[in-house]
């Protein structure tokens, strides 16, 4: 494979402190089926993480709920002590009651316990970016975000991010703390968070789209464009995201080294105006 590197995507600043390449790695897929339990190929999962860093990926996104615990443990096993410039971002605020089950828990005590667990598993004294995984409708949002503010004051996290939010919730969080990043579902086929992306672009705040490879009703267009460029449709999806906004920070995840390399190759793919118009 020709030389590929995530740096081809350019960089974005997280919290004004961490300058990361705009193609990250989402570590949900390195766990077992249903994001539950250990992976079938333990050594393969470690190889993916090591290869990601070799390819210039210096933003790795995980959560205590991935496994649960498994993703963070694998990251530490493969990469600790972490290379300078590598930002491990994790999240708290969901529980796991079984495969495919993700109940929300934004209670302050749960978030404290989640953060402490992540610190232990990742083997760090402070988490560079800690994200509230989702608002809990049973808990006032200011109580959940406020807990992260307390954890930052205690030196347990550097920067606060939020996820699965509306623009109103983003602005509400900003009343309590600087918000270093926003992570919402966004891809070619689902642009329901366009207003949140627009707000982040205006503010210069990293926007982390999850499920970035989903094609939805744009699958046909993505396949035609991929054929013209001699690439795969997921690479078109990533290139489209990177050209969509200067603050876009996709975190395509995989448990396969070849898929990882293909994703990173998308950092060098430039879509022309015709392709962008076709994708909408």
Image (cartoon, helix red, strand yellow):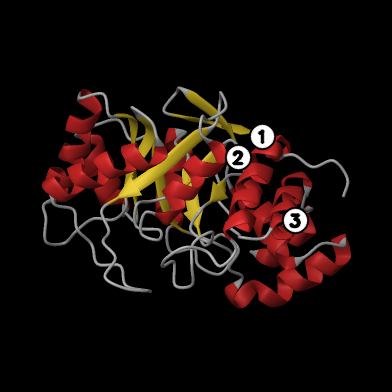
Relative to the observer, which residue lies in front, 146 or 229?
146
Q: Is residue 241 left or right of residue 27?
A: right
Q: Nearer the viewer, residue 173 or 138?
A: 138
| 139 lies left or right of 26 | left
| Gap between marks 1 and 3 measured at Cα | 17 Å
- Neighbor class of circle 2 (other Cα within 10 Å; few <14, some 14-19, many 20+) is many
Q: Quadrant of residue 21?
A: top right
Q: Earlier in the sequence, mark 2 or mark 3?
A: 2
Asked which secondary structure carries label 1, the reply is loop
Q: Which residue is mark 1?
A: 10
Residue 152 screen position, x and y as percent: 25, 28
Residue picked out by circle 2 = 22
Q: Quadrant of residue 89?
A: top left
Q: Is residue 262 above or below residue 22?
A: below
Q: Distance from label 2 to label 1 (Cα)?
A: 6 Å
Q: Which of the two labelled residues, at mark 1 and mark 3, occupies the earlier sequence position?
A: 1
Q: Position of residue 147 (x, y in %)?
A: 16, 39
Residue 66 drawn above or below residue 131? below
Give the residue drawn at x 37%, y 42%: 121
What crowding class fits label 1: few (fewer than 14 Cα within 10 Å), some (14-19), or many (20 or more)?
A: some
Q: Residue at x 66, y 34 (%)?
A: 10
The residue beneath circle 3 is 262
Asked which secondary structure carries label 3, the reply is helix
| Residue 124 vertical placement versus 106 (above, below) | above
Q: Are marks 2 and 1 in contact (CB under 8 Å)?
A: yes
Task: Identify the residue at horizontal 26%, vertical 24% (top origin).
Answer: 155
Q: Which mark is residue 203?
A: none
Instruction: Say left or right for 279 vs 74.
Output: right
């Amino acid at each position: 494979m020709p030389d590929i590197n995530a740096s081809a995507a350019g960089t974005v600043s997280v919290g004004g402190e961490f300058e990361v390449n705009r193609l990250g790695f989402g570590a949900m897929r390195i766990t077992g089926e249903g994001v539950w339990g250990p992976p079938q190929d333990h050594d393969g999962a470690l190889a993916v993480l090591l290869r990601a860093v070799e390819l210039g990926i210096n933003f790795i996104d995980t959560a205590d709920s991935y496994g649960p615990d498994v993703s963070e443990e694998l990251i530490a096993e493969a990469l600790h002590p972490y290379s300078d410039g590598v930002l491990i971002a994790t999240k708290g605020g969901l529980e796991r009651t079984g495969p495919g089950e993700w109940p929300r828990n934004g209670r302050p005590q749960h978030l404290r316990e989640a953060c402490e667990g992540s610190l232990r598993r990742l083997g760090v004294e402070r988490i560079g970016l800690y994200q509230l995984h989702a608002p809990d409708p049973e808990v006032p949002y200011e109580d959940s975000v406020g807990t992260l503010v307390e954890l930052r004051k205690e030196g347990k996290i550097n920067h606060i991010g939020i996820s699965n939010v509306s623009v109103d919730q983003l602005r509400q969080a900003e009343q309590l703390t600087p918000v270093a990043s926003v992570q919402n579902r966004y891809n070619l086929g689902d642009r329901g968070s366009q207003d949140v992306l627009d707000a982040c672009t205006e503010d210069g705040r990293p926007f982390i789209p999850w499920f970035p490879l989903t094609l939805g009703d744009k699958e046909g267009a993505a396949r035609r464009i991929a054929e013209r460029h001699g690439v795969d449709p997921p690479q078109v999806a990533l290139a489209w995201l990177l050209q969509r906004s200067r603050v876009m920070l996709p975190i395509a995840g995989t448990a396969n080294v070849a898929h990882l390399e293909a994703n990173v190759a998308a950092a060098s793919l430039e879509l022309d105006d015709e392709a962008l118009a076709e994708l909408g």
